[in-house]
Image (spheres, coloured by chain):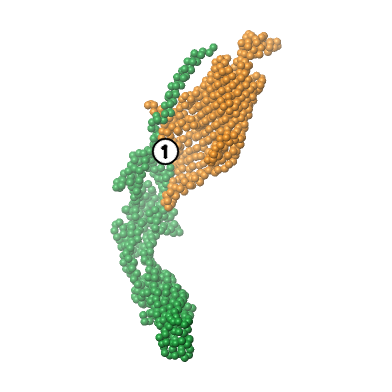
Chain colours: A green, B orange
Amino acid sequence: MPNYKTYLKYTALAVIATLTLNSCTKDYFDMDNVADGNWNPSLAAPLVNSSLNMENMIAEYDNEDLVQVDENNFISLYYKSKIYTMEVGELVDIPNQALPKSIQLDATEQAALITNGSVQADRVDNFQFDTGGEAEITSMNIKSGAVQVNLSSQFQQSGTLTIILPKVKKVGTPFRMVIPLNYTGSVPLTVEQSAYLSGYQMEMEAQGGGNEIEIQYELALENSGNTVLPTDAVNLLISFNDLKFSALFGYLGQHNMEIPADSIDVNLFNNSIAGNFTLEDPRFNLIIHNSFGMPVAAEVVQFDAISNSGTIAFNGPNIPGQLNVNSPNMSQIGESVTTEIYLDRNNSNIAEILNSKPHQIIYQMNGLGNPNGQTSNNFATDSSKVDVEIEMELPLHGAVSNLVIQDTLGFNFKQDINMIEEAMFRLDIENGFPIDAKVQLYFTDAYHNVLDSLIIGNTSIISSGVLGSNGRVSQPSKKVTDVFMDTERIANIRQVEKVIIRGDLSTSQQGSTPVKIYSDYTLDVRVGAQTKLNISL
Amino acid sequence: MKNLTAIVALSFVFSLPAAAQELISTTFSSLPQASYANPAKTPDAKWYVGIPGLGSTSLSFTHTGFAYSDLIRKRDDDSLMVDIENALSQMKASNYMSFRLNMDLVNFGFRVGKNHFSFNATEKVIYQQTYPKDLFRFLFKGNAEFLGQTADFSRINVDVTHYREWGVGYSRTFMDQLTFGVRAKYLQGLANASTEKTDISLYTDANTFDLTAKADIKANTAGIANLIDGESFNAGNYLMSSANNGFAIDLGAQWDINENFTVHASATDLGKINWKNQVKNYSTEGAEFTFAGIDVTEFMNQEDSVDYMKELVDSLGEAFDLQESSTAYSTKLNPKFYIGGTWRFTNTSDLHLTAYGEVFKGKMYPSLSASIMQQLGNVINLTASYSIINGTTNNIGAGMLFNFGAVQWYMISDNVMGMFVPQHTQNIHLRTGINLVFGRKEARDKGPRGDLDGDGILNKADKCPEEPGQAKHSGCPDAPKVESKKEDKE
């Protein structure tokens, strides 16, 4: 027989236990009771993975300069700037011009017209051609332009007026324009007629002031039976419009070519603040390109390098001083010949200038075309010009010793970084350059007061790559640096306004051994971060 | 943050999955639903029918990873704290979660001689998932935990299935001792979302912290494409869909060694569903992406730094671009295996021992249960159990079954602690229902605890159960015939 009392007792106990347990259970699920808890994940991630070569590094702060690489991957920095240009239009610019002419018949010609029924009256003029300047042109090949005749005839007869330019020829044939005069019962008879001159060669006489051309007129009239008055005339205006030449010969006159004081910026050394910099073979070139068939004399008035330490004047052949600029001869028409001044460490003070780490070069030059007057025949083409360029070629073969470069970047990290409990930055650097580098980041306030630095102590973190017997880096050096930042240092980051990046560079053996920089040298930079977060739940 | 914490914590106990053990339902000999664990187990009734929709409803949750209280812990001052470290320490390399809801729409059965026939239509919703400890180590402790190692997420498996089971069962007893049972089940697949392959990993380089992610993924859905595409959902079409067909079989056997000992074994849910309706497959094959940091030179060369980051994100997107297709696929049911024994140590008390295993994605999740059943008169049956379920040891089960005439109401749980102190448990199970059971007396009278011939000697001790006899003759009118023959021979 079952003992129901016992079962009831156990059941009651079970109910009491259940109610007790349930009250505990409710507490567990009341999320208002959850006090702050912490979640502490640790995250690791790569941040930067870059392989920097010299081209990248230069471009970082000077993208206007060229990096030249030869067949051996050897790098030269190449600055080039055109500082002056004079084009042919500034020397010779032929203006539009016109020649008025009036042709009347003399008594004999009037009688012949009446008696013979026709007459031809010939006239000749020498026209003083305006070249727009001092130029005395003997010959001009016309590229484009036109001659235009506007006439008014009082003759009550019909006929023609022929204008001939005997020295303006095309394939040996002089220019000839026949203008019909068709009398229709009323006067004056007006006619306008034009012809293109492209392809013609215009010969000019240099006598009597030069630039003369001959113009011949042939007026032929037929007697129409109408009255011939002594005052009857053909009045005309011959215009030369929009004449452009493809080449001209003669004397182009004396012309001043002033290159006013100006400057070019050299950005290479912008961020360097100390140390020595020596290049084995720096070159500075002044190059003048001239395609005028005209002697030019030039004078370098000023060529100075400006650096933080002061101004140093360039000193070398013709600098300062005068030089004769080469010009093309008659067999070189259309070509440009160059006049170059090369400065190197053997013939100039360029090494001293570069060691001063200049940031600007100031120049001023003068020039004079036909400095000795009309002593030779000149020529010019429509593309003739004078260009003056300066080049600075810096083959990266040299040494630096404790060259300190520095840059300052704005920094604003006001985000809530309280959750970062600690952080470790791993800098994994493979240096393929033959340069030791000490790198440091300074965290400062707005007034450049250093609050912290990335690396405690100025540890050399990047050693030079190992140089082989051929002077090339045979094996990059590798350095892994872990930078730990605790809560306090991380909190300081929030106060940072600026970051100063400073590098102290020295080539092998503290800069005593020159090295060459090749384009296949790389600085492989990898930065990873490992952070431990403390997130309140 | 607290709300988020609550959601995360609760999700791991309640919204996450579990195993639908039937560890103690088999202890009630009159419970028809015991045959779901072993088709050879038939109720001691002539016939039965479950109340439609109420015959049997089973709900279960299991999470092998950790209990709610492992994550949300109480301090001395009764405030709560989130203790991720502790939760992680409880996890195994691979953890299993499941949620299941089984509801009988219709079930009935009847006995004809030594044959028993049954039928059931059962709605089943199953959510199962495995996840690796690495996933949570990664999420909560960060990838720095894996420096120089691969965080392996390949054991992320998800399977959500809704299907309807139409089962026909048959069992027969041979030689009064050995019963074999089989249930053939047509499976009407309604919806599925499951992973077929999830080889996902993330390697963090110990020196450079480079991150390399790899993914080889294949996932399928069926029956819910309209939902995914945002088209209108027609519940009628969904519930009546018959395009996804499957078949499964349950096999079972029971051997009554003698009147006091019985052993049984079964294998259920041996089958699969072929999914053809509204199928969508998503896959990536051999996807790999390594992030080694930002290339400063590239970054600076871009006109807009946003472009660089966009390119980076695009590259990532291209690497892990999910390819979409519509190819039919199949999913297996989780095979389940039971083996156990019963010792009837009094006329009204049984001791049961059951070992259970369920296979999901190739891994067996075992359980072991010991239970005692006490019959109180003809009305009340009580059972209590202790189980080790998926490695958890705090599973105290209980059940009760009442037979009010033909009306049978029962409630069973493999872990009652789960209902009262869910924060401490990782398994919750409840099965309840109402059956109408007829012919129990006749069947019971014929059973080992009955007294078919009414001579006051229970059948299990009665050598002549159909013939009134005397105790001195072991229930026979005279000395047992077999013994007489033996005596004759002697």
Say which quarter of the image contains residue A64: bottom left
Determine the image quadrant of residue A215. Answer: bottom left
Q: Residue A37's x, y, as percent? A: 39, 32
Label 1: few (<14), some or many (≥20) within 10 Å? Answer: many
Q: In which quarter of the image is the N terminus of chain A?
A: top right
Q: In this view, does A289 lie above or below A184?
A: above
Label 1 element class: strand
Say above or below: B383 vs A140: above
Q: Which of A47 and B373 is in front in this view?
A: B373
* Chain assignment, label 1: A
Q: From the viewer's side, name the closer residue of A105 and B243.
A: A105
Which residue is painted at 55% across and 22% down in the image? B410
Question: Is residue A460 something one can see in this rendering?
Answer: yes
Which three-letter amino acid code belongs to the residue tagged 1? Ser
Question: Which residue is drawn at the image coordinates 54% and 32% (left, top)?
Answer: B126
In the figure, residue A228 lies in which quadrant?
Answer: bottom left
| Above-or-below relation of A488 to A368 | above
Residue A194: x, y in percent?
45, 76
Q: In which quarter of the image is the C terminus of chain A?
A: top left
Q: In this view, does A446 lie to the left or right of B84?
A: left
Residue B260 picture location, percent across and down = 59, 17
Left or right for A107, reference B457: left
Tell me what residue is drawn at x 41 percent, y 35 percent. B1
Side of A76 relative to B247 (left or right): left
Image vertical order of residue B58 relative to residue B452, above or below? below
The residue identified by callout 1 is A42
